[in-house]
Each structure stands twice: as C-alpha cells, then as structure tokens.
Amino acid sequence: MHAITIAEPGGPEALVWQEVPDPVAGEGEVLVEVVAGAVNRADLLQRQGFYDPPPGSSPYPGLECSGRIAEVGPGVSGWAVGDEVCALLAGGGYAEKVAVPAGQLLPVPEGVTLTRAAALPEVVCTVWSNVFMIAHLRPGETLLIHGGSSGIGTIAIQLAKAVGAKVAVTAGSKEKLERCAELGADILIDYREQDFVEEIKEATGGAGADVILDIMGAKYLDRNVRALAVNGRLAIIGLQGGVKGELNLGALLAKRAAISATSLRSRPLEEKAAIVAAVREHVWPLVKAGHVRPVVDREIPMNDAAEAHRVVEESGHVGKVLLVVP
C-alpha cells in the first residue's frame, strides 16, 4: 500500500507518499481500506517531531479515517467485510489501509457520505468526552468554545445547541464568527479585538461560562479561570498557547470550579472504546436527525498532504480539511 511517511521531522515537505508494507489485522482488529482521512493539529506536531505515536501504533500520521472493512481479524464480532465505517485512530489514517481496534469503529451515520464521515470520529469523540462526559454540560448552561471555527469548534457548537445550551465562541475574523453563528453560536467574540472575559461576563449578566473548552493552555489559563461561572468547569484539550502557566488557586477555590486536561490519543483501548460507544449512542442519532453535521472546508488528495498541512497551519479554514485517497 501507499502511506504518508515522515523520514525526518520538518515542514510540510517532510510528508512523503510512498509504498510501505500492508498492515495486518491482529486480535480484536479489523483492516480498513481507507477512502479518506482528516487533518488534526496533532498531525502537524507529529510531523515536526513533537508528538510521537503511542507505542505499538502505526508510525504514520492520521487520527481518524473513513472507509470499508477489507478484513476482520480474530476475536471480532459485529462487523463484516464491506461494511462502511469511520474510525478513531492512534495513527495510520494517512494511508490506503489501516488496522483498527474494533472498539474504535463507528458505522457511517445516515445522511453523511463515506468521504465526509472521515471528519467526525476524532472531533466528536474529543468534544463528547470532554464537554459532556467530564464537564457535564447541561441544558441552559453556557459553553465558551475557543477556536469556534475549527473542526473541534464547529462540532462543539452543534452538540451544545442540540442539548439546549447557550454557546459562546472566540475566533479571529468576522468571516469565521459568521460561520459560527450559522451553526448556532449565540455569543460571538473576536479574540483579536475583544477581551473574551469581559464579553462573556457581559453576555451572561456577570455570571460567566459554566463550561469552557480550551485549545490554548497556558496563555489563556488565568483569563479562563476569571471567565468561569461559580461551579464552572474548564476543559483543556490543547496547548497551542504553551504548557506552563500561573494558576490562581484562590480564584478557583472561590468559584468552586474544576479544571480537567485530557488527550485522546494515548488513552487505553478500553477507555477509547467506551467513548466511541457513548458517541454511537448519544451523537449518531443527532447526526441522523440532521442536528449535527460534519463541517468540511475542503478535500485534498492524500498524496498532497503537504498542501493540507499548509492550509491548516495558515488557519484560514473553517471545519475540517480532508485527505482523499487518490
């Protein structure tokens, strides 16, 4: 098969489409013939040499894909050759074939094409596990999403609105904020021009956000705590603004607030399977009903993954950038 390899860490040009050995479906796995994958920020970090795959996983980038089952490994039930699926991966989505633990498979939801289904697994599992399983967002509460026009953000807006929450987003341009509004966002904050702490306080009558979904980490830590409501929950899923920040524990204590920080890629298989099962139970019906849909900025041939990485690095996209197997 062909896959995107990284001989040496570097810029987008480090991504090379070349022939490599076929993967094998082991115990509890299926082999998926990939139709499309999607680009995540973690892929950029892996390309740069900062985010190695977990031990035993595929060395190729790609944390989600869609395709058809080509082979069912030993110990797998409930899936058959030819089934159209999408999958959460620890790596290997930038390839023509990938071996997937059966617990990380999802059927392609009704109303979504096989190609566009590649935009769902990583972002939906990330949002559902952090915003709902950990932070327990409830109807009537306010969710603040940093990076509302990102793949994560576009799904988080839709899921929060589907359960009856109020949604605030930050983004870096009027155009991106308009796209967020089209998806249902209620409070639009241009982080280049506005202070999100002041804006969220004003929009909530001084209360603040009940849940904050944060991709920035250290840079936003102090302001995120100030933006939280009493009993608020801050869910950190990215470190684009650094890894070390100063935390005012007094402010956290006064608000009876909580902070969680998680990554999905390195979780044990049983935890990933539990998240995927919860997504299938709670989110797939919302997709089928049309309340949640993948937001795709563009599709690029997988053998031109370098161009896809350039697009994501420039941050001009809205939603997901897909890689389609040529």
Image (tube, rainbow, N blue to C red):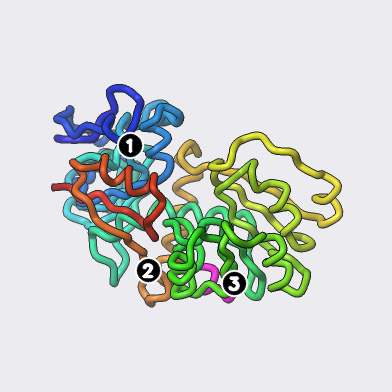
Residue at 57% across / 43% down in the picture?
Answer: 262
Mark nearer the N terminus (3 vs 1): 1
Magenta residues span: 158-165
Q: Is residue 244 visible?
A: yes
For disc 1, the marked residue is: 61
Q: Dot 3: few (<14), some (14–19), or many (≥20) neighbours within 10 Å?
A: many
Report which quarter residue 14 is drawn in: top left
| Magenta stretch contains residue 162 | yes
Q: Secondary structure at mark 2?
A: loop
Q: Position of residue 304 (x, y in %)?
A: 20, 42
Residue ID for mark 3: 187
Distance of mark 1 from mark 2, alpha carbons? 24 Å
Residue 75 percent location from the top left of the image = 31, 41
Q: Residues within 10 Å of mark 2 (few under 14, many from 20)?
A: many
Q: Nearer the viewer, residue 80 or 15?
A: 15
Type of the residue with mark 2:
Arg
Magenta segment, prevailing SS (helix, strand or loop): helix
Q: Quadrant of the N terminus?
A: top left
- Going by the numbered disc 3, the residue's amino acid type is Ile
| Sequence-first tag of 2 and 3 | 3
Helix, strand or loop under label 1: loop
Q: Measured along the vertical axis of the image, is residue 221 above or below residue 22?
A: below
Question: Which residue corresponds to the image point at 42% horizontal and 28% vertical from the top-left?
Answer: 52
CA gap between label 2 and label 3 equals 21 Å
As drawn, 68 above or below 99? below
Res 204 → quadrant: bottom right
Residue on which disc 2 sits: 293
Disc 3 on helix, strand or loop?
strand
Question: What amino acid is found at the position of numbered circle 1 in the picture?
Answer: Pro
